[in-house]
Amino acid sequence: MKTVAILDAKPGQTLTIKTQPNDQILGYVIAVDQWKGSKSTFGNWPGTDAETPAGISFQLEPADGYDVVIKADVRSNGSPQIDVTLELDGKDLWKGTTDFSSDEAPVVTRDWNIFLR
Amino acid sequence: MRHQEIVLCIVIAPLAVLLSVQVTRAQAAGSISTPSAVETVESVHETAFRAALATALGNKAAEDIAKAPSATTAPDGFATRIHNSYQDYLNLLSFAINQVDQSTDGQSLIIRFNPFQSGRNRLGITGTFSKPTVYAPIANAIPESVRDSTVALIKDQQSDLEDATISLAYSLDTERCSLKGGGRCYGRDPRTYRNLLSNLMLALAQPDTSLSVPGLSSIEAGTWSIRKQLDGLRPGSCEEVMKCPIASFANAGLVRELASKLGALDGQGTALQQRFYKAQGFATLENLVDNQPQLSVVGSYHTAGKYGGPDEWSLGLDLQVGSYNINRLRRDSGGETSNGVRLLKSYTDANSGMSKLVFSVSYKSIAAFRLTQLDLGTGPLTGFTPLDQKSTSELTAKLQWGTKLEQKVGGRQPRLDVSLDGIRALEGSVRTTNRWVATTTLTIPLGDTINVPVSIAWANKPEFLSQPNQRLGAHLGLTYRLPWEKTPSP
């Protein structure tokens, strides 16, 4: 697990997560945890080529915040990467390419924290 | 009659020639390799993360991990130039072209056309235009006194597109493979298996399974708390906390400490998860994909132009398959994801029987090349030595199969490998090489760090059984002539 970004949003906004892996990514999961007092699992989605172009969208419920976690099974050597875009109400909140270091293989985890203000 | 000798070789390699050597990349703590202009929350976090991960994994040598910048030579401008020159024509063909790449050295432009896919059958076509060169025998046939200037003149007359290669690649490639469903899946493109593998991982992401990472929840609570503190301290001038310079915070010392603690916790959490997923067999997924049956046939034709050398064509077939692969997982799991997750662990524990077969055969033919005179428009060059090269052809074949044996020796499994290598070359109609060697090797582990290979080799000619050079250690060999072999005449 590695913190990639610490971001802010408002309850009621729609968060969209879009991902595009390279060929060093074998399989991956997009997990969202909701922090409201204590953590709860909000949703888990398999990262697939079929779904990711449209992205995964959901409305942010009132809570302390959310933790978007991408867990990827990667090759033991190579340069695994996923292009990640987080959108809030259709506008970019965070956009970039996340390097998944293969020395963390087999499963590499990256976290994006979104605090609700 | 050819003598065939079976050579029994006992190869002993002192100095633990097959020592297991851990090679680790070194990465400087923080930004030692490339001096950082600004210290940010991210940079402090990264340093602490790497150090904590290395410590948690017991890899002290990797505490300083550096990515050393390497000096690079500027690539040749050939590929860029012809790419730009023919961009308009390439745009017209954009419906058919999948990708246009330039080689890293800039000397080749590679055009990949959209592959044709029909069921499992995939046919790909690639065209490559390389920077034309002057065939070395032509240059050597030019008198030395005028060689450089003549070669330069030849290069001026060569056109950009005259060194061209066209390749056709056929492969068995399943488009999408799922855990359920009959039949076999072919190919090793991760996109084929991403749905399947992602759903396997999803089974572990569900909260109500008994498969949770021990100790992770307390680390996650700790990181959440620190991230919240950092978010509360974010200066108004900075939008994203991790990218904020430490100096921009009102309490830089506190922020630096929080960033370091967060990195350390993230490192510990990563190490926990690495051990957990390895124990669940997720490192096996990579091998299961790589062991998928792969069949490909590649043919290519290369023409180098009038002064670039002889035309050549080649045809190759490659077949690879491992015994433990995705097809086996699909079969053994009965299409059930929960079974699939459980089987990953057993496949890792099994280790034995992970055999792999590699078979490849290729044929290459180089056409005859004749150049009786060199006339670049000013008449035949005086002193030029005519070239008359015969055609050549080469057939190579390779077969390899290896497996670990179930019976353990000193806690480790011996390995059995069988290989066959052959090459048959012709120059004109004269056979110049005909070499075939088969080897069976049993590698017996002695202790933790020494392996003793015992091999039996067969060759169609005795002179092909010379011992390979080894940089470390010496080896002993015994030859035994079978009783029915005739003693060679003096």
Image (tube, coloured by chain):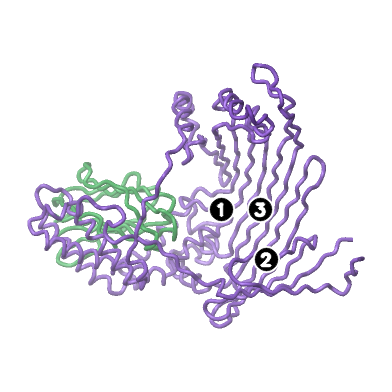
Q: Is residue B99 visible?
A: no
Q: Residue at x 41, y 69 (%)?
A: B278
**Rendered residue at 70%/20% (across/down):** B380
Q: Which residue is mark 1?
A: B186
Q: Position of residue A26 (x, y in %)?
A: 43, 56
Disc 1 residue crowd, few under 14, some 14–19, many 20+, Cα 10 Å? many
Residue type at numbered disc 2: Val
Q: Quadrant of the N terminus of chain B?
A: bottom right
Q: Amino acid at mark 1?
A: Tyr
Q: Which residue is at the far front?
A: B145
Q: Label 2, on which residue? A: B418
Q: Is the residue marked by circle 3 packed among few (<14), some (14-19), or many (20+) residues within 10 Å?
A: some
Chain the render paints purple: B
Q: Chain of mark 1?
A: B
Within 10 Å of disc 2 (Cα), the crowding (few <14, some 14-19, many 20+) is: some
> Where does the image place residue B62, in percent across and percent down from the top left?
36, 66
Chain identifier of the green chain: A
How far apart, in angstroms, are the residues tagged by discs 1 and 3?
17 Å
